[in-house]
Image (tube, helix red, strand yellow):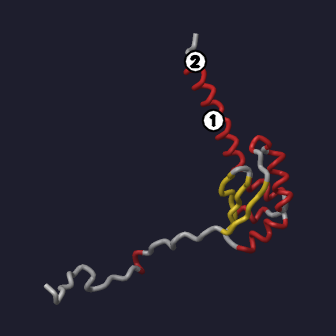
Amino acid sequence: MKRADEVLSAFFDERLMKKAHGYSKLFASWAELTEKNGIAAAAAHSRIRELDRGILQIEADHPGWIQILQTKESKLLNDFQRRFPEQDISGMSLMLSRPGPPPKDPAKEQTYPYQNHEVSSPMK
């Protein structure tokens, strides 16, 4: 006979695994659903950022892509709600992604001749 903690552990592990699998499928479906709605190119310029309290947050790399996504927002939302009813998706939020810092190019880094020298203070 199994102990209560073993049964509960198995139950919660299975439930969490199902939930994680559901999230994974949700995030992976973005390209397919944009293609289904005639805006396949948008998938290369946008992504599902997160699902927070029923709001699907979509991030795009340019305001033009946000406008294109807005034209299909209700259809996309309906598709997500039908495909993932367990996620309780009630809306979508479209946002512009923040650009990260540019990659460092060591060849372009400036060096200053006095950067490693101590500057003496006249007050010493």
Per the rendering, the mark at residue 37 is: none
Q: Residue furthest left?
A: 124
Q: Residues within 10 Å of mark 2 (few under 14, many from 20)?
A: few
Place of residue 48 in the rendered image (x, y in percent of width and height, measured from the top left): 69, 57
Quarter of the rendering occupied by the N terminus: top right
For the point 67% across and 39% down, the residue is 19
Q: Mark 2 highlights which residue?
A: 4
* Residue 52 as seen in the image, left or right of residue 69: left
The three-letter amino acid code for the residue at tag 2 is: Ala
Is residue 40 something that shows in the picture? Answer: yes
Q: Nearer the viewer, mark 2 or mark 1?
A: 2
For the point 31% across and 85% down, the residue is 112
Place of residue 72 in the rendered image (x, y in percent of width and height, measured from the top left): 84, 63
Q: Quadrant of residue 92?
A: bottom right
Relative vertical location of residue 67 with respect to residue 11 in this rendering, above or below? below
* Residue 57 as seen in the image, left or right of residue 67: left
Which label's residue is closer to the chain start, 2 or 1? 2
**Badge 1 element:** helix
Q: CA distance from mark 2 to mark 1?
A: 18 Å
Relative vertical location of residue 78 with respect to residue 61 in this rendering, above or below? above
For the point 49% across and 71% down, the residue is 103
Residue contact at pointers 2 and 1, CB within 8 angstroms = no
**Badge 2 element:** helix
Quarter of the rendering occupied by the C terminus: bottom left
Q: Mark 1 highlights which residue?
A: 16
Q: Quadrant of residue 25?
A: top right
Q: Residues within 10 Å of mark 1 (few under 14, many from 20)?
A: few
Q: Residue furthest bottom?
A: 122
The three-letter amino acid code for the residue at tag 1 is: Leu
Place of residue 67 in the rendered image (x, y in percent of width and height, measured from the top left): 78, 71
